[in-house]
Image: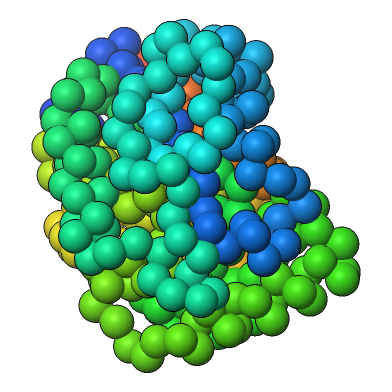
Amino acid sequence: MGRLESLAVQSAAIIGDINPENASASLTIFAADHGIAAQGVSAFPQEVTGQMVANFLAGGAAANAIAAQFGIPVTVVDCGIMHLPAQRDGLIDMALGRSTSDSSTGPAMSPEVASKAITQGRHFASGIGSKIVCFGEMGIANTSAAALLAHKLSFISVAELVGRGTGLDDTGLSNKREILERAAARTGELAPIEALAEVGGFEIGTMAGAMIGAGTSDKLVVVDGFIATAAAALARAIEPDCEKAFVYAHRSAEHGHRALLDWLEAEPLFDLDMRLGEGTGALLAVPMIRAALSLFGMASFSQAGVSGATPAS
């Protein structure tokens, strides 16, 4: 059964149960804004972050539709949205500000706030009751923050990590690359928390903390696309032991995701040319994980009465 066998063994070892019916799942979407958006690195304005959060809360986004198909509850966390939606029922407040600062001109946040992001994420994960945890994100310009953070952690070139995000044209992509090169050049080699403080996002740091908390407490962590993988790289850099619980769901269409996965030596489960984020790819991995666990219920050849092969004479 190829990769399903190793997935089954990993999943059972982490959650401590081979029964797929006990493999409950949840999705948490972390949302925040990024000061570097002021440099025109995204095709959409910052207002879209809050508008999409409102859509998540109303159940109208792609992540909601897929989650509903699998019976997976969705939680939305405000880590620092600039334009909050008018209706915020169900939105969890973990805001560290109302957007990071512009990392092309200075630190995105203070080291103290960066540490708080990790800490609050770890604490949040301790309250998640499901065995399988999917994490998604929303934040205009967060592919820029993810690319910069991945660069600082891996030393992969900025050019290899910069992509079109939500749909930049060639001119916009060239501008984005120039802005990110400038942001990266402000600082040299950095420790993980320093890297988060200089270039990262509130939601990326909080997600990384949640990955650490979940990955060290018998929960299977399903890593989504490029931004979630940057968070996973940060989580691994801070707490290497948490990675044993990581399942990398998919290889997204965002330009830098392949390079980052290769650096992590991570083999995703599938590649559907997706680039939406929101945890949509992670959600699609859940039925595959449950199917893998079901293999423990297979009968052996002898149990099934299947005749063995006759040795060649």
Using the image, determine if residue 153 lies above or below residue 79.
Answer: below
Q: As rendered, which of 93 and 98 lies closer to the eye?
A: 98
- The residue furthest right is 170
Q: Residue at x 16, y 47 (%)?
A: 119
**Color encoding of the figure:** rainbow
Q: As rendered, which of 28 and 271 lies closer to the eye?
A: 28
- Quadrant of the frame with the C terminus: bottom left
Q: Residue at x 87, y 62 (%)?
A: 169
Q: Can residue 121 be seen in this view?
A: yes
Using the image, determine if residue 158 lies above or below residue 88.
Answer: below
Picture coordinates of residue 220, whole percent (x, y): 27, 36
Picture coordinates of residue 18, whole percent (x, y): 23, 23
Judged left or right of residue 189, residue 112 is left
Judged left or right of residue 45, residue 194 is left
Q: Can residue 302 be seen in this view?
A: no
Judged left or right of residue 191, residue 69 is right
Give the quadrant of residue 194: bottom left
Picture coordinates of residue 197, whole percent (x, y): 32, 66
Judged left or right of residue 115, residue 229 is right
Using the image, determine if residue 236 lies above or below residue 175.
Answer: above
Q: Residue at x 37, y 90 (%)?
A: 188
Picture coordinates of residue 204, whole percent (x, y): 40, 51
Give the quadrant of residue 72: top left
How many numbered marks appear?
0
Q: Which residue is drawn at 52% across and 54% down?
A: 34
